[in-house]
Image (cartoon, rainbow, N blue to C red):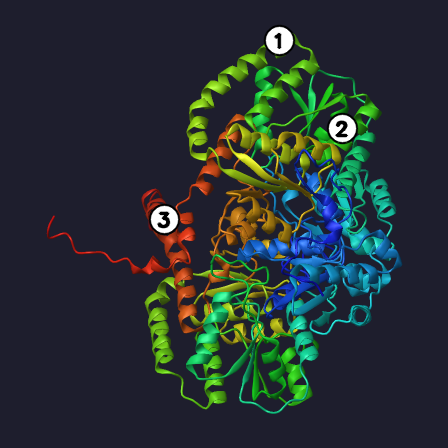
């Protein structure tokens, strides 16, 4: 059908790829549904909702649907808890053929009864999967009835996989949180903030919590890493919301501002530059003199503490080039800055769910010639990694084998991670992992692969002369 | 005993969905790409799961159904998906599987594909469809069903030939390579389906191909109808999903069904079939391997007697590992699969009773139920796939990882566990796990037991 020799990419995908250039004024096409057959790296609405809600440690997550959705999302993320571990379980109504024909409402309702009888829960989320939307199960009604019956929070999450993309799932998750908050009276304001869009991967929230504690800013509610039912119901006390993962939670911040008058700022604790700016920004917003002074003291101490180690890695990474393919735009922006800090160049940047203004910022931060893509696929990733000669790819689980097969280094920026990437110590971890992968001895052998004289080396017996 | 803790809930699934099985099956066909007709998430979740086990790129296209397609039918999306997939990958074969969503809205994929072929005037690509709704069964059935559809689609009445069909279960690429070596050593010409030995465990070289070389060729699949026999590794596959049964019913190819060749009896059985079909003696090499396995079994038998195991996973692996344990005096206290299989339960209970084991046998189980039985029994070994890690962590019982998926350790694709050699390696791993526990605790155990206890004088009174 097509001439594969000259193949570049699908026509429908061309508008979602731009090259950073003085002569390019075109806006990137983004925030749309994936192209059929393009092999998108994105997941679905349900995935987005589960990402947002899963870290709430004492919540019961019932996935209403056939088994797959619950199976593939059981305890796969590195969100840590200082309290309960309920969230590490995955419940499914495990719908079978009969349920699809006769409807699954009864089963769901019984399932809720079973959980309530066995565990005495405070908070249950019920996720709608694809089929639920089609067979017409009214999960809102089932949840409402159960909520009235038991007097506990049973929140429906409208996350049928086909009804939008991963971003719509973030919104569904945020709506579930809003739903929960709105069921409690508005609290009197206190001095303290809510921390939105951090999922406490590898304890990242704890690092930032300690920073904030040191500068004199208490966290009232964490959303949603290491959070709990009780903590979430207190969210209206906060005088400021700070948002880390903007892609997933800026919507929630906007709603909280509208409904409860809590202003918000976007922050990023990924990379030293962003961490410093974020701390300063928080202090400025709160307008507390003591906090402002504390921040400066804290920054200068931390900078000194990590300077030497960081400069070691800088030397080893200088001049290397990186390709980025991650979930959200804000994460990509932080990564570009981090590579700059380390003297590295970003040659390709792509995201699954970036927004127009994020792509504009990406364009302004990167050099001429950098390729920028939205909702890319393996074919495009391979093509641009090779074309741009990247030394390392940053991505998630699915991108890793591709990088390795292409014989280049890989940085795991996924939700499974087991070392924190936040704050000053996170920046060191970042540089360290990059050094480990970029400067690994294995690449020497990979480069030699295919050379003819590899096997022709013999050891000579020279010990006699010694 | 097979009842789950919850009647209406599955808590921590011990199974995956049908399209997952189909994805692995299609990956073993040469020049094949897969498209999942459904919403975007299904393909991504399945890709992610497979990529973590095999550490290989796993590209699966999706028709990316959205609200419009769901309401008005997904033919347009499916056709567009196929068109784009062909542009991107230029495959010889496209495997099309459905999802819960596509099945529920009643998509007739056969007709849509037929239209597509006509509209686009496609001559050189084969399309194979398989209905795999997520609610229709587990990944276990999905795997065999996709294989059956491949065979149904690609075979016609043909002249008898001298080849043997061998349909392998969902085993590691290393195990598939091992079977190919046996067949070669027996001098048997064969069609092995599906051949993931290279496609899901490709050697590194400097010319990466999006469609990994290897896999069963269409030419070989076409020969299956004229083969002299079929060996199907899959004792518990329902007839309607069995490719071997189809070949027998349709073309009269004699079918030998057999368990996974793990453990001495199962491996004997397998080698005897090979010997019978090829009319050749078992090569000396394998008789020696067998002797070494027996030697290993003797060496380890006392250590193994301390083993009290919980075994879980796909029906085939669960059955074979249970046999291996029984042969070596390791008690299979709890045996469980997430798949619905009365036959497995019946056969296991027969075998276990014969050896006087009063074990718990669970089918259609979830990990919550397995976990609750583990708490009631003193178990010191978990044998199964990575999802047992949760119990390993909570109960501090070592987990020996075997089967699919293994996503928290490397090397799932390289595990050699079949035949005399593979079984011996696996047995050594099991024995050493027991020994490691023993060595790390016997000093303090005995110290606590005999040194720290006070003398009980009451017995003298």
* Residue underneath mark 3: B440
Q: Regarding mark 3 in the picture, which secondary structure is present there?
A: helix
Q: Residue at x 49, y 16 (%)?
A: A301
Q: Nearer the viewer, residue A462 or B36?
A: A462
Mark 1 or mark 2, which has the lower sequence index? 2
Q: Are marks 1 and 2 on the same chain?
A: yes
* Residue A22 makes an appearance in the image: yes
Q: CA distance from mark 1 to mark 3?
A: 54 Å
Give left or right: position of B232 versus B328: right
Which numbered marker is on residue B38?
none
The crowding category of the residue bearing disc 2, from other C-alpha atoms within 10 Å (few below 14, some 14 to 19, many at least 20), is many
Give left or right: position of A66 versus A459: right
Q: Residue at x 44, y 84 (%)?
A: B187
Identity of the residue furthest to the top in this view: A289
* Residue underneath mark 1: A290
For mark 3, name the chain: B
Picture coordinates of residue A218 (x, y %)? Answer: 65, 19
* Residue underneath mark 2: A253
Question: Can you say whether A207 is above or below A390 in the image?
Answer: above
For mark 2, name the chain: A
Question: Can you say whether A97 is above or below A438 in the image?
Answer: below
Question: Can you say whether B323 is above or below A423 in the image?
Answer: below
Q: Residue at x 50, y 20 (%)?
A: A302
Q: Nearer the viewer, mark 1 or mark 3?
A: 1
Q: CA distance from mark 1 to mark 2?
A: 26 Å
Q: Regarding mark 2 in the picture, which secondary structure is present there?
A: helix
Q: Are marks 2 and 3 on the same chain?
A: no
Picture coordinates of residue A381 (x, y %)? Answer: 61, 49
Picture coordinates of residue B74 (x, y %)? Answer: 83, 60
């Amino acid at each position: 059908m097509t001439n594969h020799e000259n193949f570049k990419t699908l026509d429908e995908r061309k508008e979602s790829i731009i090259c950073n250039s003085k002569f390019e004024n075109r806006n990137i096409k983004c925030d749309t549904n994936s192209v059929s057959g393009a092999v998108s790296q994105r997941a679905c609405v349900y995935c987005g909702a589960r990402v947002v809600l899963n870290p709430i440690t004492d919540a019961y997550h019932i996935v209403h649907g056939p088994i797959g959705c619950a199976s593939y999302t059981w305890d796969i993320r590195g969100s840590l808890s200082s309290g309960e571990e309920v969230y590490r379980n995955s419940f499914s109504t495990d719908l079978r053929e009969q349920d699809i024909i006769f409807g699954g409402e009864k089963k769901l309702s019984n399932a809720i009864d079973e959980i309530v009888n066995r565990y005495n829960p405070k908070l249950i989320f019920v996720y709608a999967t694809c089929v639920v939307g089609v067979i017409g199960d009214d999960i809102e009604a089932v949840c409402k009835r159960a909520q009235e019956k038991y007097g506990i929070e049973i929140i429906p999450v409208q996350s049928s996989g086909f009804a939008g993309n991963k971003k719509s799932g973030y919104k569904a998750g945020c709506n579930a949180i809003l739903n929960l908050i709105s069921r409690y009276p508005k609290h009197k304001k206190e001095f303290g903030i809510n921390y939105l869009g951090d999922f406490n991967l590898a304890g990242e929230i704890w690092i930032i919590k300690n920073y904030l504690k040191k500068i004199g800013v208490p966290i009232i509610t964490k959303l949603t890493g290491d959070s709990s039912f009780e903590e979430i119901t207190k969210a209206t006390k906060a005088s400021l919301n700070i948002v880390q993962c903007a892609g997933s939670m800026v919507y929630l911040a906007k709603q909280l501002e509208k409904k409860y008058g809590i202003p918000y700022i976007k922050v990023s604790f990924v990379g030293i530059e962003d961490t410093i700016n974020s701390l300063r920004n928080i202090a400025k917003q709160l307008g507390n003199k003591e906090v402002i002074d504390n921040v400066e003291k804290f920054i200068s101490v931390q900078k000194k503490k990590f300077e030497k180690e960081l400069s070691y890695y800088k030397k080893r990474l200088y001049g290397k080039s990186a390709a980025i393919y991650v979930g959200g735009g804000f994460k990509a922006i932080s990564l570009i800055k981090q590579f700059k800090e380390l003297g590295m160049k970003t040659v390709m940047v792509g995201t699954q769910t970036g927004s127009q203004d994020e792509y504009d910022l990406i364009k302004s931060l990167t050099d001429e010639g950098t390729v920028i893509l939205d909702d890319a696929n393996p074919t495009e990733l391979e093509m641009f990694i090779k074309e741009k000669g990247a030394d390392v790819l940053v991505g998630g689980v699915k991108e890793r084998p591709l990088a390795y097969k292409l014989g280049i280094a890989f940085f795991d920026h996924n939700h499974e991670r087991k070392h924190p990437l936040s704050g000053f110590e996170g920046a060191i971890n970042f540089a360290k992992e990059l050094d480990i992968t970029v400067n690994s001895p294995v690449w020497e052998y990979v480069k030699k692969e295919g050379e003819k004289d590899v096997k022709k080396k013999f050891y000579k017996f020279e010990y006699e002369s010694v | 005993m097979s009842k789950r803790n919850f009647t209406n809930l599955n808590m921590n699934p011990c199974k995956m969905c049908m399209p997952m099985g189909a994805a692995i099956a299609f990956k073993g066909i040469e020049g094949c790409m897969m498209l999942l007709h459904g919403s975007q998430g299904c393909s991504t979740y399945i890709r992610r799961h497979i990529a973590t086990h095999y550490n290989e790129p796993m590209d699966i296209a999706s028709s990316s159904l959205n609200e419009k397609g769901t309401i008005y039918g997904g033919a347009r999306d499916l056709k567009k998906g196929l068109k784009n997939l062909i542009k991107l990958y230029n495959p010889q074969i496209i495997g099309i599987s459905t999802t819960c969503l596509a099945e529920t809205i009643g998509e007739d994929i056969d007709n849509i594909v037929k239209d597509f072929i006509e509209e686009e005037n496609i001559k050189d690509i084969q399309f194979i469809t398989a209905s795999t709704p997520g609610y229709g069964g587990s990944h276990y059935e999905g795997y065999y069903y996709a294989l059956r559809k491949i065979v149904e689609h690609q075979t016609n009445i043909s002249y008898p030939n001298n080849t043997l069909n061998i349909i392998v279960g969902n085993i590691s690429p290393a195990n598939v390579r091992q079977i190919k070596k046996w067949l070669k050593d027996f001098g048997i010409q064969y069609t092995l389906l599906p051949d993931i030995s290279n496609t899901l465990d490709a050697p590194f070289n400097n010319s990466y191909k999006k469609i990994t070389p290897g896999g069963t060729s269409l030419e070989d699949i076409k020969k299956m109808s004229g083969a002299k026999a079929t060996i199907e590794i899959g004792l518990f596959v329902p007839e309607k999903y069995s490719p071997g049964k189809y070949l027998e019913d349709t073309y009269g190819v004699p079918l030998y069904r057999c368990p996974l060749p793990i453990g001495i009896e199962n491996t004997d059985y397998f080698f005897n079939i090979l010997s019978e079909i090829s009319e050749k003696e078992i090569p000396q090499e394998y008789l020696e391997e067998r002797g070494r396995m027996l030697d290993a079994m003797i060496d380890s038998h006392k250590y193994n007697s301390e083993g009290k195991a919980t075994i879980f996973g796909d029906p085939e692996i669960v059955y074979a590992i249970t046999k291996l344990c029984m042969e070596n005096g390791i008690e299979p206290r709890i045996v469980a699969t997430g798949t619905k299989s009365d036959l497995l339960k019946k056969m296991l209970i027969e075998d276990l009773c014969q050896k006087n084991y009063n074990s718990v046998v669970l089918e259609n189980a979830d990990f919550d139920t397995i976990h609750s039985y583990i708490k009631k029994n003193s178990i010191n070994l978990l044998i199964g796939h990575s999802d047992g890690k949760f119990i390993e962590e909570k109960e501090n019982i070592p987990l020996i990882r075997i089967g699919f998926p293994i996503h928290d350790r490397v090397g799932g694709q390289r595990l050699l566990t079949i035949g005399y050699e593979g079984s011996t390696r696996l047995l050594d791993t099991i024995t050493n796990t027991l020994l490691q526990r023993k060595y790390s605790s016997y000093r303090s155990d005995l110290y606590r037991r005999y040194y720290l206890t006070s003398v009980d004088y009451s017995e003298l009174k």
